[in-house]
Amino acid sequence: MLELDSNIQNGFVDEEGVMPIIHKSIDLGFNCGFRGPTGCGKTFLVQELARQYNKKLSILNMTVDTEVEEIKGRLVPKYNKGTKELEFQWVNGVLVDAMLNGHWLVIEEANFMNEELASVFYSVMDHRRNIQLDEHENELIKAHEDFRLFLTMNWGYKGTTQPNDAIRNRIDAWFDLRYLPQDKETDLLVQRTTRDGEGVKREIAYKIVDIANQFRKRDPSENLPDVSTRILLRWSSMVREGIEPDIAAEYNLIPLLRYDEIEKAKIREIVKTTFEKQEKVLKVTKGKQLDSAVIGDGNTIKVGDSVECSYADGKIEVQEVLGIVQSVKSDANPDGIRVILNKGWMHANQLRLAKK
């Protein structure tokens, strides 16, 4: 069984070690803001916190169609069987309901709320902790002491805007989230796809994350979609069920590119190349530091050897480069070796001894 890092709990990875600070902020009654790229786990983090605190959590997703009535409440018609007349009954919105009952509320994509919607939250987020329902006899709703408000946003990332000053100034504690390091995101995919003691194979999960990172590192001017952790989870789940990685990619990764057939062809090629069975992959014993290893053609690779590496650069084109073996260690990389290049070190998916 895979032994997960101690900071991976119930599917959430506290890579930065900020959970104690988040807990303190919640205990202080702070409005907490979580910022990060699409699909990096902002809402999942709040869901995990609600689970830890045993609190009911409501989610409000801000869109161009969100209306004030959805937040505060509205009068809805109801037929009275006794009087046989149509009456109007007040129904609380998601914010008012959470405030009255001491529930938690997370506002997704909070930076997209317009000025009218933002103004609804001003008195809720400052020292007053209340809201006046002008639409319902000016009723004043005071927040239950257990009520907490969380805001998630991708402000600062491509194609996004920042929230207005009034909202930003009312967020008591900011937390920046980012995609996990490759090894940690790989572990997360394995854990989150595990059922009956078996998840997606780690070496496959590692390659799935590697492909995602190639997207993430490309120039923002190319306007490519974000490859989120949730996309990788769907992809990994399909693979775990026996679907080949390149086939599964057609149903979650490739559709992100919409109508760009040239880009789709490039991605299909890199996915195919990444998951092709390699005859020259190092054979190593898990968890042990080795002096050398034997590759598929019978040659021995050892620390200090020059090797040829196949890898994909930022343009997602396969290239051949020379590298020097730095270490042979299976738990550092599923392919069992780390090589040094002229611009840093990398994990190589394919290796062979360089021609002398």
Image: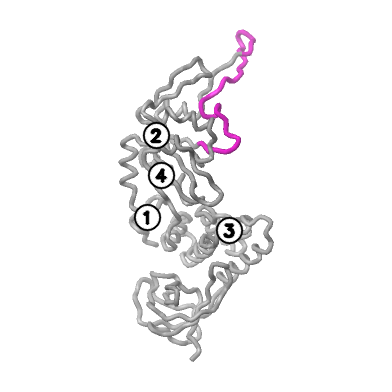
- In the rendered structure, which disc, 2 or 3, sits on the residue that comes first in sequence? 2
In terms of secondary structure, where does tag 1 sit? loop
Taking 10 as reference, is 314 left or right? right
Q: CA distance from mark 3 to mark 4?
A: 34 Å
Q: Residues within 10 Å of mark 2 (few under 14, many from 20)?
A: many
**Magenta stretch, residue numbers:** 60-86
In terms of secondary structure, where does tag 4 sit? helix
Residue 15: mark: 1
- In the rendered structure, which disc, 2 or 4, sits on the residue that comes first in sequence? 4
> Between tags 1 and 4, which lies in front?
1
Q: Residues within 10 Å of mark 3 (few under 14, many from 20)?
A: few
Q: Residues within 10 Å of mark 1 (few under 14, many from 20)?
A: some
Which quarter of the rendered picture does the N terminus lie within?
bottom left
Q: Which amino acid lies under the numbered mark 4 shown in the image of this protein?
A: Glu
> Measuring 48% from the left and 44% from the top, which residue is drawn there?
153
Residue 306 lies, in percent from the top left, at: 44, 84
Foreground of the two, 172 or 228: 172
Work out which residue is located at the far bottom of the displayed protein and give it: 356
> Measuring 43% from the left and 21% from the top, which residue is drawn there?
141
Q: Is residue 309 above or below residue 18?
A: below
Q: Is residue 332 visible?
A: yes
70 falls in the magenta region: yes
Residue 138 lies, in percent from the top left, at: 48, 16
Q: Can you identify the residue that label 3 sits on?
A: 221
- In the rendered structure, which disc, 3 or 4, sits on the residue that comes first in sequence? 4
In terms of secondary structure, where does tag 3 sit? helix
Q: Can you identify the residue that label 4 sits on?
A: 48
Q: Which amino acid lies under the numbered mark 1 shown in the image of this protein?
A: Glu
